[in-house]
């Protein structure tokens, strides 16, 4: 298999794994809070309130992960730049 296939395949696999991980965390959060959601609905909360709660928590999780990932990528790029001689960190392979 050529290197070009790996360059496009590995990020796709990483994205799928990240999506499955986020789904798993949100699913676990909802399953542990199912009683709370039921009580909120029984006490008169709107039907969309639990949905908004879960979506806002998921978006907060995604935003935090994105921020940490971007900061880590910038720091790692600066570190790698010190190790390279006469090569830029984002040079494409020939």
Image: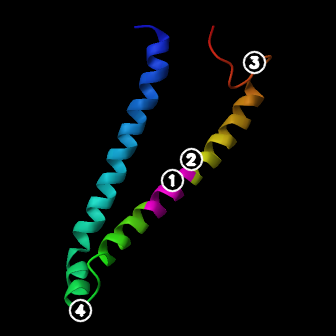
Give the residue displayed 52% in from the left and 57% down from the top.
Answer: 63
Label 2, residues with CA under 10 Å away: few <14, some 14-19, many ≥20: few
Lower position in the chain sequence, tag 3 or tag 4: 4
Q: Which mark is residue 43?
A: 4
Lower position in the chain sequence, tag 1 or tag 3: 1
Rendering coords of residue 56 (x, y %)? 43, 68
Distance from disc 1 to disc 3, alpha carbons, whole Å, reads 30 Å
Q: Which mark is residue 65?
A: 1
Q: Which mark is residue 69?
A: 2
**What residue does disc 3 label?**
87
**Is residue 1 located in the magenta-colored stretch of the structure?**
no
Q: Are marks 2 and 4 in contact (CB under 8 Å)?
A: no
Q: Are marks 2 and 1 in contact (CB under 8 Å)?
A: yes
Instruction: Read off the magenta span.
Output: 59-66
Please determine whether, in this image, residue 10 is positioned above or below residue 57.
Answer: above
Distance from disc 1 to disc 4, alpha carbons, whole Å, reads 34 Å
On the rendered structure, is 41 left or right of 2? left
């Amino acid at each position: 298999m050529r290197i070009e296939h790996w360059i496009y395949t590995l990020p796709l696999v990483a994205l799928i794994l990240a999506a499955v991980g986020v789904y798993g965390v949100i699913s676990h959060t909802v399953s542990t809070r199912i009683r709370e959601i039921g009580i909120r609905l029984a006490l008169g909360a709107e039907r969309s309130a639990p949905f908004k709660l879960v979506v806002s928590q998921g978006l907060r999780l995604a935003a935090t992960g994105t921020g940490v990932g971007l900061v880590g990528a910038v720091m790692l790029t600066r570190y790698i730049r010190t190790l390279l001689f006469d090569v830029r960190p984002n040079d494409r392979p020939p």
